[in-house]
Amino acid sequence: MSANPDHPRRSPATVVIVGAGPRATGLIERIAANAPELHGDGAPFELHLVDPHPPGGGRIWRPDQSPLLWMNSMAEDVTMFTDASVEREGPICPGPSLSEWAGRLREEGPPHALPPELAAEATALTGRSFATRRLQSAYLGWVYERSVAALPPGTTVHEHRDRAVRVTGPYDGRQQVWLEGRTAPLTADAVVLALGHLDAEPDAEQRALTAFAAEHGLVHLPPEFTADSDLNALRPGEPVLVRGLGLAFVDLMVLLTEGRGGRYERGPDGELVYRPSGREPVLYAGSRRGVPYHAKIGYSLSGERPPVPRFFGPAQVEELLSRPGRPDFRRDIWPLIAKELGFAHYHRLFTAHPERTAGPWSAFEEKYAACPPGSPELAALVAAAVPDPADRLDLDALDRPLTGLRFDDHEALQQALRGHIEADLARRHDPAHSPDLAVFLALLSVYGQLIRFGDIGGWWHGFFSFLASGPPGPRLEQLLALSRAGVVRFLGAETAVAADPLRGVFRASSASVPGHVVEARALVEARLPEPTVDRSRDTLLRSLHRDGAAATPAGLLAVSPADARILDRGGRPHPRRFALGPHTDARASGAFARPGTNAPAFRQNDATARALLRCLRDLSCRASLTA
């Protein structure tokens, strides 16, 4: 593929991007946007994309997925393009969101390459719809084609449907990217890893469970991308233990119910009813929290947005980073985050629902700012100014809603969990609770600041996903119907799974129903594997680490926060190697984003694209072309 392959000038500089999914696509968009400024001499350069899967969507967003699998964001909240909110040095290059792109297809007619079923979905899509992943794949493919077309004249793009296995080369010279099954490498002036979510070798617990399953003729599905799991081993009617109630669980639920011929219909009272096909297993699902992720908020914010960042912004981050030693997340960072989320919550409560407060916002804001984070004075201020405890922000209760609750039996837990989900659905679709949306926007702001700290541990990412990255409301309505039909049974909080060698089964219990145990011959770990360098199944990532690239204590690839250059174990940034994505300690919340939210991934893409273009322009880099 070529933007303009006929160019008479000197041999082109070369960039190899390993991975061709949405993160690589976003990087190419930023390279095209910044090239007129930083590559304005018209010299040609080449991009090589290495990925076994189609460019644009990559593996996770590949088109050959079940049409039953949805995105967990509304179509109007999905964009690949920068806007004025994004803090960047490069130019803004506006482009359509997913819903706007679909609207263009309605007006102009879908391209011939779009399959009829996707064309039909696109023309029916609204901004409030949850698109299928296959349609998102088509949108990402379109963004990729548009971004390639915007590259400077003379740029040539080569697509390699291969797997990269190693990068070699001197610190200050050209790099070699070795592809699986090929004898000659790709030679590059710079290499970018945009690997996305990766498979991992099991940890000690998972290895033991797999070995136990093999010994006793059981089924154990370890953490992996649900669309890649072999679910045929889960037999109809049999109990299956499931650890995890996040998005991977929702995918599992869909593929084992509707995916096996079940269907939903409305009862006479409007309640959703599940009609089984008879081919479903019975899912006994639990997790540490014991409840599914909060539903996506189903309304838009009217009026003033929360003025964040206020208590956790660039100034606070700079102050923390300037201290001797590494900031501790719980001691130093979390109190500021909690105060920031509270500020957004109460700003919205006072300005949009003043009848539920005692006194003016200006007076509350002044006192709130003066109170130390997490202090008794802050709690007393909130108690005096917000009469109803239900209107106060309790982050601990939000994070662990079942803590301390005990139920007499398994059926009492089912009723309580259905009530919890029903209440969550009602609240997330009721603008009377719009402080929840203000907290969501503050969470996005916080995430954008946290990327400067590198690896902060896994708790924050789980908390963020639980509150801000849950499933569409209709999925939780389906979960309720499955629970009423007995296809899904909740296990409760602090779910524990053990192998019972005497009975040759897996056993699950929880703190929510003391003494209650469920036995099953199948166990599914409904979550993605942790992105650790040492256990990654990606040969390239492991070899980089083995050859000297640094990793954090949690196993993430260490990169420079300024431009994503890969760091060695001495903290030195590599001049020609970069990495973006969830396997790095600068992982952002997603490769695409909600418009107007200063998305961290867009900021990182812009900084990395500019660093790449400066590298190609640099005389030392160019001199190596003729060396």
Image (cartoon, helix red, strand yellow):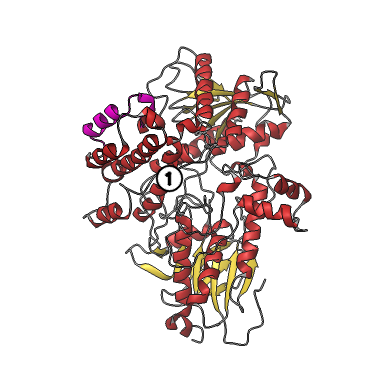
Report x, y in % for residue 93. 54, 64
Tell me if residue 548 can be seen: no
Residue displayed at 60% across by 30% down? 218
Q: Is residue 441 magenta?
A: no
Does residue 182 appear to the left or right of 599 in the view shown? right
Q: Which stretch did the figure color magenta? A: 374-394
Residue displayed at 25% across by 31% down? 381
Task: Mark 1: give few (<14), some (14-19) or many (20+) Cα within 10 Å.
Answer: some
The dominant secondary structure in magenta is helix
Report x, y in % for residue 409. 49, 13
What amino acid type should be assigned to the residue bearing mark 1?
Arg
Tell me if residue 213 can be seen: yes
The residue closer to the viewer here, 531 or 202, is 531
Report x, y in % for residue 128. 61, 42
Report x, y in % for residue 277. 73, 26
Q: Quadrant of residue 332?
A: top left
Is residue 200 placed above or below 18 in the rendered structure? Answer: above
Is residue 487 placed above or below 473 in the rendered structure? Answer: above
Q: Quadrant of residue 340?
A: top left
Q: Which residue is mark 1?
A: 305
Does residue 411 appear to the left or right of 356 in the view shown? right
Q: Quadrant of the N terminus?
A: bottom right
